[in-house]
Every structure is written in C-alpha cells, then in structure tokens.
Amino acid sequence: MSVSSPVLFALDTATDRVHLALVAGAQTWVADLPGGAQASSSLLPAVQDLLSQSQRTWSEVDAIGFGSGPGAFTGLRTACSTAQGLALGLDCPVIAIDTLMAVAEDARASDPAAWSVGDVVWVLQDARMDELYVAAYAWQAPGWQAVQAPQLWALCEPGQRWAQQAPAHLAGSGLQAYPDAFASVAGGLRWLHAAPRGAALAELARQAWAKQDVLDAALALPRYVRDKVAQTTAERMAARA
C-alpha cells in the first residue's frame, strides 16, 4: 500500500455511460463506454484494459472507488457489487464517491477559470420519470464541500425556486434532458454536458485516499434517494396524455 503514490481504480455506472479511471501516482488513465444493459458485460474487460495500459498489476491496487449514486437503480448496484467483488478479492478497501459531486468536479475541471473559492454549483441529473437528482456543492480548493445533500426534485421545482434568478453555477444532464423545465430559470452559468467522467472520479478518489476516507468492502452501499424506480402503466399513460 502506497499512501503518497497510490494505485486506485474508480468506476461509475450511475448514468447511461460507464466511466472508469485508473490512478497511479500523478498519472491517470480513463475510459468511457456505453452503459445500460451493456455495462455488466463491458465493465470488467475495460478495467483489465486500463490495468494493462498502466503496466500495473492487480497486486499493486490500493483501493477501488465506485460511484455510489444517486443514479440508475441497476447501475448503482452494478458499480457497488463490482467494487465489492474486486476489493474483497484484492483485500483492499473501497472509496464511495458521490456521483453528483463527480459531475460538479467535471464541470469545474472543464473551465477552471470560471470558478472561485466559495462558488456553489447545483447539480441536476436526469432521474427519469420527470424528476431530477439534485445536490449543491461549494468549491473549497482543492476539494468540495456538500451544501445540499442529494435529494429528489419534481421537474417543476427548479423553475419555482429560481424563477427570478438561478444560482451562479448549474451542471448536469437534467439541463439538457429537460430544457423546457429550465426555460423560465434566468441567469447562471450552465454545464449541460457535465458527467461523472473518469478524470473527475480519479480526482475525487485521490482526495479521499489522501484523507484515508475509505471503507471496508462489506460496508459499501449504493445511495438511493427514492424507493420508486418505475411508473405504473396507468401513470405512463397519464403522463403521455
């Protein structure tokens, strides 16, 4: 185990993409693959491919990071179970990574000049069923502080809360998936394409490792913010009407 120059895997399958990263000291290797039904079959081969690219061995891996959510129900279970299986086999800990915080980090890293210490970003991820996964984070270089823990919002809530003025920073797939819901939201810099990409996962994994914010693999759990994962037939028909 290397405290100062760790080898870390990080993966997230909470969205319709599989995002992967391998950290080895200051170097990072990333992958971005189709998600959904293909995630479980493509995930482990992609992990092995990153390991080969880095010329590292499994015995050198210090921890497995995983996107704990919130996000797609099946995707969260895929990430958690994969991380647990790898960590148990390697006898190493896991790192639970807030998926929405990874979206915030991806937005910040894409345009660092737009951010100052103390800036707050609201992350709004598409939760399907006309709902959003929402959280807020303050940039406290070199890391993030949670201001609003992840929760579920109805699609109308951003317009109601921010009818006069949006927060300074907005990011996430919800902005792109539901443009009409944000048509009445005035102002604010927006990162529509921000996602829990590999580089963001790698950075959060590094920060967690530096603080030794790790878990025993048996304690790894997905973060769910709703119990209902699908609409009934009647609800789908009503929504279409």
Image: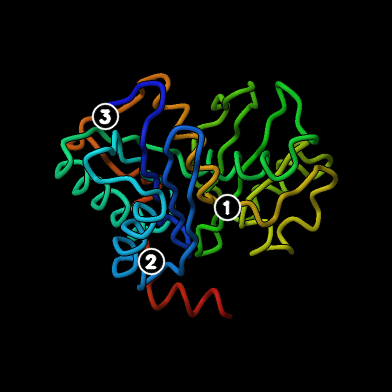
Q: Nearer the viewer, mark 3 or mark 2?
A: 3
Asked which secondary structure carries label 3, the reply is loop
Q: Are marks 1 and 2 in contact (CB under 8 Å)?
A: no
Residues packed near mark 1 inside 10 Å, few (<14), some (14 to 19) or many (20 plus): many
Q: Earlier in the sequence, mark 3 or mark 1?
A: 1
Residue at point 28%, 39% (across, down): 61
Q: Residue 101: percent from the left, percent from the top?
A: 53, 38
Question: In the rendered image, which quarter contains the N terminus?
Answer: top left
Tag 3 residue: 215
Tag 1 residue: 195
Name above or below for residue 68 compared with residue 235.
Answer: above
> Label 3 to label 2, Cα distance in Å?
31 Å
Toward which corner of the image does residue 123 lie, by quadrant? top right
Name above or below for residue 76 compared with residue 66.
Answer: below
Q: Residue 230: percent from the left, percent from the top?
A: 38, 66
Asked which secondary structure carries label 2, the reply is loop
Residue in the foreground of this view, choosing between 130 and 45: 45
Q: Please name the amino acid that badge 2 sits on.
A: Ala
Q: Are marks 3 and 2 in contact (CB under 8 Å)?
A: no
Toward which corner of the image does residue 241 lie, by quadrant? bottom right
Q: Nearer the viewer, mark 1 or mark 2?
A: 1
Toward which corner of the image does residue 68 lie, by quadrant? top left
Q: Please name the amino acid that badge 1 sits on.
A: Ala
Tag 2 residue: 230
